[in-house]
C-alpha cells in the first residue's frame, strides 16, 4: 500500500474546502481567485495532497487566464494525462500520478519550445520556495 495515499475522510480533514473540491472532486477554482496565478517567486509547486514536486517556477508563465500556467512539468513521470470529454469539450486532464489529485488541464497553445500550457488550479498546489525549506500556503487575502 502506498503510504502517501489517504482515505477520502483523511483528505477532507487535511485539505481546505476549495482544495478538497478541486483536488479530490475535479472542481475548477474561479479564475483570478487562487493563490498562485500572480505568484512569481523561485521554487517548486508541489501536490497539495501528497507533496510530490509537479512544476518549477522556471516553466511558469503569465497566460492571462487567471490560473497558474506552466510550459512543462518538473518531471513528466509525475503527471498523468487523461482524455476528458466533460462539458462537451475534448480536453486533456492532468493529475498527480502518485495520489490521483486533479490538477487542471493541458492545452496546446503554450509558448515555444514545448507549445504546451499546463493550466493548473492553485488549490491543487503548494509552493516550496528555493530560498527556504518552508512551504508557503499564502492565501489571496494575505496579499
Ligand atoms: Fe499528489
Image: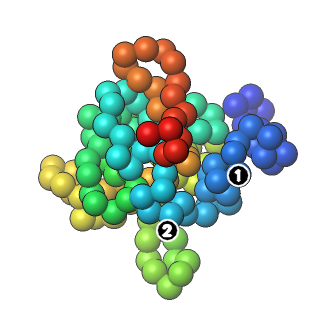
The residue located at (37%, 16%) in the rendering is 131
Number of the label disc, if any, that sits on residue 83: 2
Residue sitting farthest toward the left: 112
Q: Residues within 10 Å of mark 2 (few under 14, many from 20)?
A: few
Which callout, 1 or 2, points to the residue nearer the camera?
1
The label on residue 56 is none
Q: Quadrant of the N terminus?
A: top right
The residue that appears at 41% across and 30% down in the rendered structure is: 44
Q: Nearer the viewer, residue 70 or 129?
A: 129
Coordinates of residue 124 in the picture (x, y in percent): 55, 47
Q: Residue at x 55, y 48 (%)?
A: 123
Left-right relation of 93 to 50? left
Q: Which residue is mark 1?
A: 17
- Give the side of residue 110 with respect to residue 8, left or right: left
Estimate the spatial distance between the alpha carbons at disc 1 and disc 2, rounded to whole Å: 26 Å
Is 99 or 66 nearer to us in this picture? 66
Amino acid at each position: 500500500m502506498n503510504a502517501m495515499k489517504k482515505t477520502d475522510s483523511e483528505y477532507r480533514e487535511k485539505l481546505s474546502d476549495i482544495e478538497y473540491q478541486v483536488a479530490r472532486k475535479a472542481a475548477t477554482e474561479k479564475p483570478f481567485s487562487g493563490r498562485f496565478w500572480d505568484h512569481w517567486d523561485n521554487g517548486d509547486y508541489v501536490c497539495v495532497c501528497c507533496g510530490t514536486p509537479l512544476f518549477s517556477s522556471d516553466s511558469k508563465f503569465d497566460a492571462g487566464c487567471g490560473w497558474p500556467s506552466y510550459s512543462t512539468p518538473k518531471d513528466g513521470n509525475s503527471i498523468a494525462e487523461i482524455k476528458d470529454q466533460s462539458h462537451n469539450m475534448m480536453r486533456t486532464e492532468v493529475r498527480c500520478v502518485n495520489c490521483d489529485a486533479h490538477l487542471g488541464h493541458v492545452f496546446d497553445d503554450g509558448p515555444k519550445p514545448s507549445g504546451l500550457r499546463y493550466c493548473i488550479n492553485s488549490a491543487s498546489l503548494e509552493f516550496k520556495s528555493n530560498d527556504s525549506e518552508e512551504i508557503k500556503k499564502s492565501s489571496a487575502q494575505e496579499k
